[in-house]
Amino acid sequence: MDVLTFALIGLGTGAINVLLAAGLVLIYRGSGVINFAHGGFALLGAFIVMDLRTEHELSLPVALGAAVVGTAAAGLLVQVLVMRPLRTASPLARVIATLGVLTILIQGVLLEYGAEQRTVPLPVPSEPVRLASDVVVGKQNFYLVAIAVAVVVTLSIATFRTRIGNALTASAENSRAASALGWSPNLLAALTWGSGGALAGLAGALFPATSTGFISIAQMSVLIVGALATALLAQFRSYYLALAGGLAIGIVQALTTRYVDQTGVADAVPFLVIVIVLVVRGKGLPVRGTAADRLPRVGTGRAHPAIVVPLAVAAVVLLRYATPSDWYPALIVSLCFAIIGLSTVVLTGYAGQLSLAQFALGGAGAYVAGRVAAARGWPFEFALLAGVVGAMLLGLLFGLPALRTRGVNLAVVTFGLGFALHQILFSNSDYTGGEFQTKISSLRFLGVDVDPITHADNYSLLCAAWFLVLATVVATIRRGRVGRRLLAVRTNERAAAAIGVSVFQNKLYAFVLSAGIAGVGGVLFGFSYPTVLYQQLFIPDMSITVLVITVIGGIGYIGGPLVGSMLVPGGVAVLLFDTSSAATSADEGFVKYVPLVTGIVLVITLIANQNGVVDQLMEPLRRFRSRWTGDEASTIVSGPRSRVAPKSLEVRGVTQTFGAFTALAEVGVTIAPGQVVGVLGPNGAGKTTLIDVITGYNRPGAGAIVLDGRDVTAWPPHRRARAGLVRSFQSLELFDDLTVRENLLASSEKQDLAAYLTGLIHAGTPRITDTVSAAVEELQLGDVLHKRPQELSYARRRLVAIARAIAARPSVLLLDEPAAGLDEYESAELGRLIRRLADDWGIGVLLIEHDVGLVLDNSDRVVVLDFGRVIAEGTPADIRESDAVRRAYLGESLVEAVP
């Protein structure tokens, strides 16, 4: 009967999961934010009850009420002071802000109550109940389930059977529409943040019932993992699913504790749920926000040697000859965090993948290096290399979920991965050296004594050297082909695939490379201690710290991690503000306030300038450079133009359905080399769906796509693009993080694998192809090459989108409403360009347009769609005279469009 006993015991933990998840769902429904600070609210509620009951001897109802009211007020303040100013920011920026709030809450409680474990009277009766002769469990489990059920029923009734609940549902679907009906999105968000905070406070106040009356920051800081897993099962919508999922997770955790004799496995159960649901189901957490997440600005990666070399030399001289000996430990800490921060620049700044596991990956590198050094006696150089390789292999595994998830969704997965790694590996002494632990001694690197205790100056120089080397690598990547690929993926995965960039390859590359960089930082950080205590050094929260300090400094800039690393616990900031703190304990001086200040600075940075401190410092330089923009325009010169490889395209009987709706019904189109085929039809006729099917964004239910005699129906979009099948987008979908010139280069460059290695040491010189030259000349873009697309008018951006498609040197070019937003003169020029592409270059063109005159004037053949069916096909003259076209929807307008 052990199974039943432990299953019932798990109901208590499951009920806490339910209460926390209900708050997460409520906050998301009202504001669209996935709140990583939710566990911090629960922590605050638990310690309010502890303080009032043990220090002030107040009754449970009073303490419980104070906790609920206090956390509700905290939630309301977060909405008003943080989330409301960030309402127009990207979902990622708002999630990072909640990490800052989490840091503030945890550090505030830590400063007030300390890190030690506290006892508090149980909030509900806990007498044992005998359900059978050998089944005995505490009453508290049933009380907690009853409370969870009552909360879920109340929330469900309030959500689905009241006016304000309907308003929340409407706001979740479309906040503007709800506002038009008289409901203030800000008011609804404030209500849900306050109520969600209250639920978290209630969960925290009841938590001691599951831990026999003990609470601590370490215990409660991981509650968010179970809560996120539960809310994920509920799809962030259903409270009843949260009830079932939360209880199920609690039961599985309890059974795992009983039957699995492995440290940390039970704690990792919620993480396993997250991975299974997100990766196997293939759906991410629902993220509300702008269509394109605008991450902070990215630097150019350019640095003049005349500036960098003297600064590097000066830094080395200062470190070696002018730095007090008691400063070295703090410098080593900051430099190690700066190195790991560089990995965040690559992964989040360049590739747009939000990871909360970078410090854990660094810990994995330290683990491999430490074990081969301590147990096998490997020299430091080889141990470091082994650690980097180990971190990269783990980074490859961590990157696999990124193929199915992105953004906030990926943050949830990686946080769970890092947490599981800590609980299963770092916290298990059987894996970390047992009673002998992992002791490091007599470190030498390339024959130089770099022992961090006896030669801290040399060790700090080693850390600085590694930072400079890796910063150079990251900057080189940014300037080269791989950097443009990564930024294309970060900005718009669909558009990146449309120019031949493999989203799969680049995401995995970013994860593996960033893991290698993190591995270097982790090894250096771990080896800076005589004994590598993995459980204490590489805690999950440190990955949040790495992200926080990098965002503060500037997540898109090489110098961002270095600036932000001054604020890490034990880093340089404690020396700048309190020079005596280097030699004192962490409980004295300014040092104990550094994490709290870091959280506050992060929130202020996101509100004031999410691009970071370095971006603000670079503003004068950008203004100076803006005066010298003629060089880039002059690099585009006309040259001999050769015809593209001739390839024909056949669309054979394609049918595409969405549920019961048929978007395309047995559509067939043939495009020969050098031929322009126009497609006409009203809105909803299936024109864009046709392009999506041809280019691989939709898989047809029937039919085939044949390119140059090869069936490419099963090919992914990037492979079709590389084969010469390129498209433009009706909604432009430009790479706003790149300049116009870089947009064109990204499209025209060879998508080879060798660049992933050569790009680490040599950015290369961008080669301007004849198609790029032609696109710039024909569309008159020479004067805007140095600008980013968002700086241009809509009409110029439309021309850039067309130029980017042409720059890929396609054999078949699919243009989706290219004249939208252009004036009559620009449309006429576009028509002449399309004819030249076909006649002079031999490109086959599929032209979809609402401008009937443009299509009929420049097409060799025209296909007319209506409700997904071909109703007419022939020459422009045939279409003008088609009775079927007139009867269907065009009337006399088609005849009158072109005299």
Image (cartoon, rainbow, N blue to C red):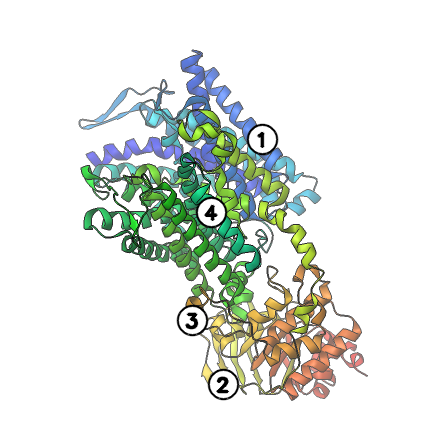
Label 4 vs 1, first from the N-terminus: 1
Q: Which mark is residue 753?
A: 3
Q: Nearer the viewer, mark 2 or mark 4?
A: 4
Image-quadrant location for residue 790: bottom right
Residue beneath disc 2: 708
Image-quadrant location for residue 74: top right
Label 3 vs 2, first from the N-terminus: 2
Farthest residue in the top direction?
57
Disc 1 residue type (three-letter): Leu
444 over 845 or under it: above or below: above
Q: Nearer the viewer, residue 359 or 577?
A: 577
Q: Secondary structure at mark 1?
A: helix
Residue beneath disc 1: 76
Q: Position of residue 771 (x, y in %)?
A: 61, 79
Disc 2 residue type (three-letter): Asp
Q: Position of residue 576 (x, y in %)?
A: 51, 34
Q: Nearer the viewer, residue 149 or 291?
A: 291
Image-quadrant location for residue 797: bottom right
Q: CA distance from mark 1 to mark 2?
A: 61 Å
Q: Nearer the viewer, residue 343 or 51?
A: 343
Dot 3 and dot 2 residues touching (CB under 8 Å): no
Label 1 vs 2, first from the N-terminus: 1
| Drawn side of residue 493 relative to residue 688, left or right | left
Residue beneath disc 4: 317
Label 2 vs 4, first from the N-terminus: 4
| Within-10-Å neighbours for mark 1: few <14, some 14–19, many 20+ | many
416 over 389 or under it: above or below: above
Residue sitting at 54 percent across and 43 percent down?
A: 552
Q: Secondary structure at mark 2?
A: loop
Q: CA distance from mark 4 to mark 1?
A: 51 Å
